[in-house]
Amino acid sequence: MTHPADTHCPYCALQCAMTLTPTIGTTDAAASASPDAHVHSAPVTVEGRDFPTNRGGLCKKGWTSAELLRSPSRLGAPLVRGADGALHEASWDEALDLIATSLRDIRSEHGADAVGVFGGGGLTNEKSYLLGKFARLALGTSRIDYNGRYCMSSAAAAGNRAFGVDRGLPFPLEDLDGADTILLLGTNVAETMPPFIGHLAGAQAAGGLVVVDPRRTATARLTDDGKGLHLQPAPGTDLPLLLGLIHVVIAERLVDLDYVASRTVGFDRVRRSVATWWPERVQSVTGVAALTLKRLARRLAAGGGTYILTGRGVEQHVDGTDTATAAINLALLLGLPGRLGSGYGTLTGQGNGQGGREHGQKCDQLPGYRKIVDPEARAHVARVWGVDPAVIPGPGVPAIELLKLLGVPDGVRALMVHGSNLVVSSPNVRDVRAGLERLDLLVVCDFFLSETAALADVVLPITQWAEEEGTMTSLEGRVIRRRRALTPPAGVRDELWILHELAERLGSTAAFDTDPAVVFEELRLASEGGLADYSGIDYAMLDRGDAAYWPFPRGSRGTPRLFADRFAHPDGLARLVPVTVRESARPAPTPGTDEITLVTGRLLEHYQSGAQTRRVPELLESQPEALASMHPATAERLGIGDGDEVEVVNHRGLVRCRARLTPDIRPDAVFLPFHYGDEQAANLLTSDEVDPISSMPEFKTNVVSVRRIADAASVRLPEETGVLA
Ligand code: SF4
């Protein structure tokens, strides 16, 4: 295959369009003839392609994405752990036979729920769909969930509660171009998805770009022209900040009363719930000046096109659903959702974080965003699958609970992992690692020997994005085509094929097709009539470049803009839901001690657990290690200098890294990126406490101490040093 292929970036949910061109003269045949053909694809060049989200632009992750196709560390054959404890290459038949035999044994001894499946928000829609079907029919287990639980669950729960549906952006991204005011809550798009900032230019020029972040990030610096606004609240105080904004909007009669009366229910309860959040009280809690709060509320209500957008910074908390709900309440009171030129949305992070949560990877869902406990939904999907509805297991448990069941009595004895690097990306990774080590069988599908794959009993090497066909759903809810540009190396396989082979070996009579086009046709049927209805979408229209926003019922033209006339609740009205601050929601630093709040997040150069981007030389060279960013005043108080080796420590674990001093962070916080593994894994320190509604863990505010390593030896806890030895 030597012709160019139009596809999209493998990383984030902006899904920037790109064209991949195999280098002239290096055909697949030539590549296959090379001595290392079992590992390497042919070289390929990457060019940005014009598309509404990226307008031809790519970030450095996108520009360098093709390097992974030929990475020397790419896996080229299945690996099976031998009696000597090491991983050894094996044939596909050996590896698959071993997995199937082990799974059968575990199921017959411990029951079907002793097998768990952990999926990922980077899998194509076809893989996500088939993985959910595989878990429920071929394995018969209810225990499937995925890493989207770490990034989108709270926003999804809040959206479902308020609007009756969860689509990250209920409008095309280009709608932002005409905005006068954009409020960005806890999102650093300038680093996580740089081409996005082109859509902020209008609001920036109008002096209406407002960034809420405890760090002065690259996105916050877009307001440095003095026209916009950067609010730097204390970590973990986003909810009081939003309650204060709602208080001002109500107190200053800025509410769009016609909209609230005709399109929402619940105003009185929300009004009462914010009565005590007057601006001066909010100032004392958040550190944001009362006057600034009032100015912002007035600006948001000024008309001319206002958007409120949330990201993980305000969502990855034990009260993330309530915080996202408060942002939605604010938007509803201002009459934004569904109004052309205004709106509310949340920015999905992972490449297919949107589609990945629609078609059955979540423990409580069936395809089409159907509820697994709904008898009608079960009957519909059972018809498509050709089974009795009773065969489909009931709801399983969300990701963190699933991980806590690893290797415990009546828990999970075998786990299949697709598209996740659990021992880097999960909270409290020390316990996750211990759970994985207790398993009878751990199977990991990956391109590389990630930190999680290195613990597996069987590692299955899989195709990368440029070697496969399928669909993704962008942060706008737009379904797009992933196109194959290259023939994969001989030793790797597509996960659809892997699921097919395993289902056959497990004796499943259900269909597990290996052709993505056929799987998508089945997905269309399974999703038909659901909230995320894809039944009117087909590969041909996607190949033509038609814009396909779900819901897209058969015979319709899709839905670029949701909520224009009604919300998705049966009565068509949005729910204003009162939320309150739970003082005990998360631990706070003890006054009078050296404790400080740890904020975790991302860097421009790396994506998620870094399993891919840490293997791209340019990206690794640019950001080779985790640095603990702290304010110079804090560093001085702790006796830490720029570049000093430090330990960031709490009762869960310890991270060793160097300090980076910057005035861009509040003195009461320290920042660690979460892209690194082993002793630099920020998630050694994060809590696996979860939001009670969404089951999303608390990634953003955890209590730690920071010490120079030279000063720290005498106070290190023995079990923490043992873990890291
Ligand atoms: Fe890829 Fe996201 Fe960068 Fe675009 S912004 S090139 S989708 S990583």
Image (cartoon, grey):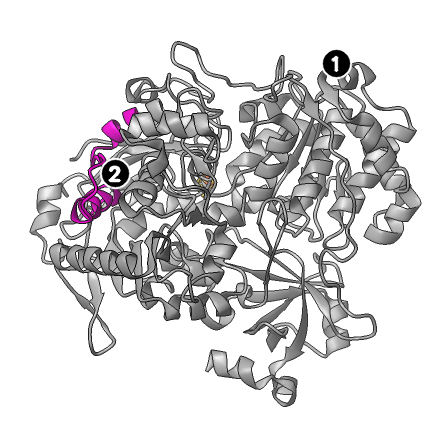
Question: Picture quarter containing residue 110?
Answer: bottom left
Q: Earlier in the sequence, mark 1 or mark 2?
A: 1
- Rendered-image quadrant of the N terminus: top left
Numbered disc 2: secondary structure: loop
Residue closest to the eye, 500 or 178: 500
Residue 672 placement (x, y as % from top left): 59, 62
Whole-number angstrom distance, CA of label 1 to CA of label 2: 47 Å
Q: Is residue 206 left or right of residue 9?
A: right
Mark 1 is surrounded, within 10 Å at the Cα level, by few (under 14), some (14 to 19) or many (20 or more) other residues, namely few
Tell whether label 2 touches label 1 (CB within 8 Å).
no
Residue at the image position 14 percent from the left and 55 percent from the top: 92
The residues colored magenta run 493-522
Q: Residue at x 46, y 49 (%)?
A: 147
In the rendered image, residue 515 lying in the magenta stretch gets the answer yes
Q: Is residue 342 above or below residue 156?
A: above
Q: Is residue 200 left or right of residue 34?
A: right
Whether residue 703 appears in this view of the structure is yes
Position of residue 437 relative to residue 176, above or below, is below
Tag 1: amino acid: Ser
Under mark 2, the amino acid is Glu
x, y percent for residue 635: 72, 72
Identify the image quadrant of residue 56.
top left
Can I make out residue 50 in this image? no
Name the residue located 46 percent from the left edge and 55 percent from the top edge. Answer: 402
The residue beneath circle 2 is 468
x, y percent for residue 13? 47, 38
Predominant SS along the magenta part: helix
Q: Residue at x 41, y 50 (%)?
A: 143
Q: Nearer the viewer, residue 400 or 168?
A: 400
Kindly give the residue lying farthest to the top in the view shown: 555
In the rendered view, would you say 313 is above or below 596? above
Residue 262's mark? 1
